[in-house]
Amino acid sequence: MNSKTPTEINKDILLPFLIYDKPFPYYGTITLYPVTMDNILLFQTLSQSIIIRKDSIFHNKKIIKMSYLDFLIYAFGNKELETQYKIPYLSQYYLYAIQLLQLCCKDAEITMDQTGYLYINKILITPEIFDDLRRIIILQNEIDFDIDEFLNYDTEQRLQKADTQNRKKDKITIEDYIDSLIIAMNTTENQIINMTIRKFWRYIKRYQLHENYTIAKTGECSGLVSFKEPIKYWMLSLEEEDKYKYLKTDENELKGKIH
């Protein structure tokens, strides 16, 4: 298997598989399946292991220079690092990543050698392949994370704090979302259980757009309400413009500055 550049695994390549939740055959050797809603809570826990912004969190050239896979191996069992950076279960994130691969590559044989490196279907998982698998899992399951970007640590902490406060204010749980979608789509819990996580969140977002559009259009047509800008149609793309793009740096650009 040849080494690949980051751009070779992207949403455009996966799109034919994403549309109808088809499993993705990675170079015909490893098949990754989108996770379904019956494993949503497990997935939310395990997926934390593949979305650490290590280059902004860890102010250490040695760690920044590491591949993501080597970083997980380095952090495995490292309670001191976990305590120093106040990241709960960081020392277990490598095991989380392995369990995540087992969840997403459900038909695969996954083993580990004495150095800590993984084999899937007898193929050595190099740092480059691991990054590809991360990209696929992130795209297949609609995780809001770009593994190539660098976001200043202090800025990210402020954004996460604001996001946490908003979620606490709304007090919406995953069960609330499930209940709401069942009512909105006139569906059943069994159908939700077998729905992929990616499609679940897309349906939630689409329904919200539809409701907002309907309310706004009704108000506008009544003549009682007017809007400064045209009302966005509910069938428009769900892709959101990155409001924080100007704050981010490409990971490769950052590593190129470190000697």
Image (cartoon, rainbow, N blue to C red):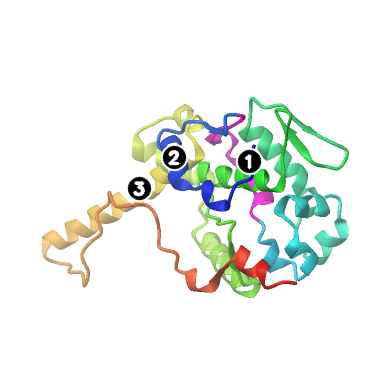
Disc 1 marks which amino acid?
Asn
Which quadrant, please, contains the C terminus? bottom right
Between disc 2 and disc 1, whose residue precedes?
Answer: 1
Disc 3 marks which amino acid?
Arg
Q: Position of residue 237 (x, y in %)?
A: 33, 52
Q: Nearer the viewer, residue 254 or 235?
A: 254
**SS assignment at label 1:** loop
**SS assignment at label 3:** helix
Q: Magenta stretch: give its range.
A: 29-51
**SS assignment at label 2:** helix
Between disc 2 and disc 3, whose residue precedes?
Answer: 2
Q: Nearer the viewer, residue 87 or 6?
A: 6
Identity of the residue drawn at 67% across and 37% down: 101
Residue hosting label 3: 206
Answer whether residue 244 is visible to the viewer in this image: no
Q: Quadrant of residue 20?
A: top left
Residue hosting label 1: 2
Residue hosting label 2: 199
| Residue 255 in magenta stretch | no
